[in-house]
């Protein structure tokens, strides 16, 4: 029986999906949680210099979706045959597409005459909140994510929002 070690930050994040698969399968695994202050010391040793990382008998693999699919196949959670597996993959891709289209890789409206929606404000609020939390661990959530950072900048430049950001009381979360 192979030994499994899943390494991620001391958070749920993108490793939580793999943890759920391990738990549902009843499979033992080492759940290694790295404090942020230790991350710089191990970053260079990781595939693609990123987490999560799954080690199988010492061999390292990365990319959370690939890890989850592997574990799903390994532990019989991808359907009873190839067609059911295709449906499972299809559903996972639908979800990934929704996240990428609407939360991560969304395209921003260039027409200034179109109204701002609560979705625009909600995305801004959630990303701001998550970004502020991750700053505690010296992680810039927006690094390399220009669609999100551009969206946040546009929301912050809306006249009423810009005014509020200057006037609101300075508080912790």
Image (spheres, grey):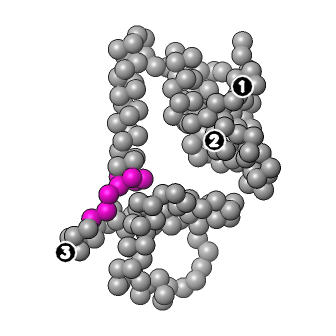
| Residue 106 percent coordinates (x, y) | 35, 55
Residue for badge 2? 48
Quarter of the image with the C terminus in it? bottom right
Mark 1 and mark 3 in contact (Cβ < 8 Å)? no
Mark 3 vs mark 1, CA separation in Å? 54 Å
Quarter of the image with the N terminus in it? top right
* Horizontal side of residue 157 vs 23, given as left or right: left
Q: Secondary structure at mark 3?
A: loop
Q: Nearer the viewer, residue 32 or 24?
A: 32
Foreground mark, 3 or 1, reads 1
Q: Secondary structure at mark 2?
A: helix
Residue at left 35%, top 22%? 87
Which numbered disc flags the more N-terminal residue, 3 or 1?
A: 1
Residue for badge 1? 59
Indicate the quadrant where residue 162 lies.
Answer: bottom left
Mark 2 vs mark 3, CA separation in Å? 42 Å
Residue at left 39%, top 52%? 105
Foreground mark, 2 or 3, reads 2
Which numbered disc flags the more N-terminal residue, 2 or 3?
A: 2
By secondary structure, the bulk of the magenta-drawn segment is best described as loop
Q: Secondary structure at mark 1?
A: strand
Residue for badge 3? 113
> Magenta segment: does it hold 105?
yes
Q: Residues within 10 Å of mark 3 (few under 14, many from 20)?
A: few
Would you say residue 1 is visible in this rendering? yes
| Residue 75 percent coordinates (x, y) | 56, 17
Mark 1 and mark 2 in contact (Cβ < 8 Å)? no
The magenta stretch is: 102-109
């Amino acid at each position: 029986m192979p030994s499994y070690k899943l390494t991620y930050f001391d958070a749920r994040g993108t490793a939580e999906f793999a943890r759920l698969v391990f738990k549902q399968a009843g499979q033992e695994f080492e759940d290694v949680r790295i404090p942020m202050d230790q991350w710089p010391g191990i970053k260079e040793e990781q595939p693609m210099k990123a987490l999560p990382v799954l080690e199988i008998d010492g061999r390292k693999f990365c990319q959370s979706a690939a890890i989850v699919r592997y574990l799903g196949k390994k532990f019989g959670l991808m359907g009873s045959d190839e067609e059911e597996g295709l449906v499972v993959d299809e559903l996972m891709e639908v979800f990934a597409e929704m996240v990428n289209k609407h939360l991560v890789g969304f395209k921003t409206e260039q027409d200034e005459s179109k109204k701002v929606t609560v979705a625009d404000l909600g995305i801004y609020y959630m990303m701001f909140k998550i970004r502020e939390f991750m700053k505690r661990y010296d992680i810039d959530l927006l690094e390399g994510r220009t669609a999100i950072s551009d969206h946040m900048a546009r929301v912050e430049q809306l006249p009423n929002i810009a005014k509020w950001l200057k006037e609101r009381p300075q508080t912790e979360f």
